Image: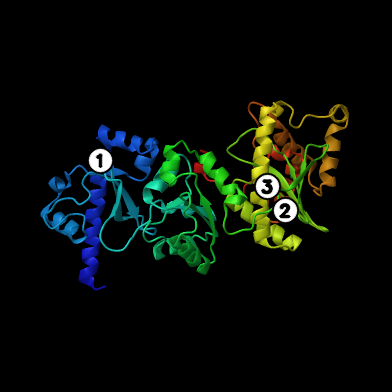
Amino acid sequence: MGAEARQVDIEARQWLERAAEHYHACLLHSPEAQDILRKLGIYSPEIITAFRIGCSDGTLTKKLAAQGRQALKRIGLLSKSGSEVVNGCLILPLLDPQSKQVINLYAYHFERSQHLFLPGGRRGIFNPQAAQNTDEVIITGSVIDAALLWSIGTRYVIPAYADLGLTNEIIEHLVEHRIRRVVLLTGEGTANCVLTQQMQARLAESSIELRIVELPAKDASTFVINGGTSDDVRRLITEPTNTLTSEQKPAPQVKMAADGSFTFNLQDHEYRIRGLSPKGLDRLKVNVRLTVGNNFHLDTLDLYHARARFSFAQTAAKLCGIAEKQVSADLLSLIERLESMRLEMRSKGAEEIVGQMTPQERDDALTFLHSPDLCERIVEEFRRCGFVGARSTVLTAYLAAVSRKLSEPLAVLIVARSGAGKSVLQDALCAFVPPEETVRVTRQTGQALF
């Protein structure tokens, strides 16, 4: 591209950015356009500002200088006669994934239910940030489908283009962010269409696994309008019967132990689950132990988090000598069973009895509590866990852990030189806390806490 052509491209982008801002302002000041959004199934005010959604009412040209009109004619937003080609449409900006600048517009015509783009290639991505901090994203067939799913809380969603599928730009974006799996949501009866098969082949070339899930509706928009929720989407995605890329497996055999843990046998793999709680249906945090022969791997994770599942599968595959994909498929199979079991626990009022002590356990605990040498016994228990440290350090850390039961718990910051045993202390400390009350993170942002 020559210097003159680059200058034209930069100038057109600047005017396109201004046009997107104008359309956004039009929507914010138009109750009629906001009513149409609600009729489309978009009720979340957050999505309007998050993606600068707008609408065209035909007033753009009144806000433009002659230079701007010429620039927008070159990129096709204005016709040769100077009228807006997207007049009467809902407008969603498409961004360059690197600069986050507007490089294209998606327009949805209210009355004709028509999808429109600017002339030329399908440049730009809607919701490019969905590929950050995850290894699995959801792909929909259109931008409006992705917008509706985002509005109900399904945030890791990126749209393909119904007529072209996944562009090179989208695939490169997924590869750059190390996306390992894509879940394609298709309309009922369309899972085996030629375009879907082409998308599967292209993703395979980039070492990205594709799972295809058929919605019980014509498309994702209809699914949301008919009352589909984010939980419904999660259930559909985690059902093994909805994937075309893995063989359907028999339901795992389940056994319940006296301590309240569950054991699932999947072929020659044994999964022990502890800490299943009927509380907090927005997460599925449990302690998982996988045993294969004489090898095992143990960790506490939220099964709803794709990255946590990937990390568990990756480590378990190395330690237990089985395929990583096998472990990932097993975890997805377990999710469905655990969700059913948790709902059953809620229906039976198990929320009040989860983790209840036996009479013998209660007597032992009270005997320990009233020991005259309680502090020394606590220090000795830490030594048994493999931590040998200063008595005051051990007791202070343990006191902070126990204070989680108070209305105003204590906080502890462990500071020491490298190699002094900070991680060993933390591991030993977490061993004394029930897994359902433990959250372990290596890094956490202020936004995550919010």
Residue 420 is marked as: 2
- Nearest to viewer (mark 1 / mark 3): 3
Q: Secondary structure at mark 1?
A: helix
Which residue corresponds to the image point at 26% horizontal and 48% vertical from the top-left? 20
Q: Nearer the viewer, mark 2 or mark 1?
A: 1
Q: Is residue 122 left or right of residue 217?
A: left
Q: Which amino acid lies under the numbered mark 1 shown in the image of this protein? A: Ala
Q: Is residue 131 above or below residue 440?
A: below
Q: Is residue 385 left or right of residue 214?
A: right
Identify the element where label 3 is drawn.
Answer: helix
Q: Position of residue 133 (x, y in %)?
A: 52, 52
Label 3 crowd (10 A; few <14 / some 14-19 / many >=20): many
| Display coloring | rainbow
Residue that label 3 marks: 334
- Disc 1 from disc 3: Cα separation: 47 Å
Which of the numbered marks, if any, corresponds to residue 432?
none
Q: Earlier in the sequence, mark 2 or mark 1?
A: 1
Label 3 and label 2: CA atoms lie apart by: 39 Å
Query: How many neighbours does mark 1 have within 10 angstroms: few (below 14), some (14-19), or many (20 or more)?
Result: some
Report whether 286 appears left or right of 232. right
**Vertical placement of residue 42 versus 247, above or below:** above
Pick the front one: 227 or 342: 227
Under mark 2, the amino acid is: Ala
Q: Within 10 Å of the Cα at label 2, are there few (<14), some (14-19), or many (20+) other Cα atoms?
A: few
Q: Which residue is mark 1?
A: 25
Quarter that holds the N terminus: bottom left
Distance (Cα) linking label 2 and label 1: 57 Å
Q: Are marks 3 and 2 in contact (CB under 8 Å)?
A: no
- Whichever of callouts 3 and 2 sits on the residue coming sooner in the sequence is 3
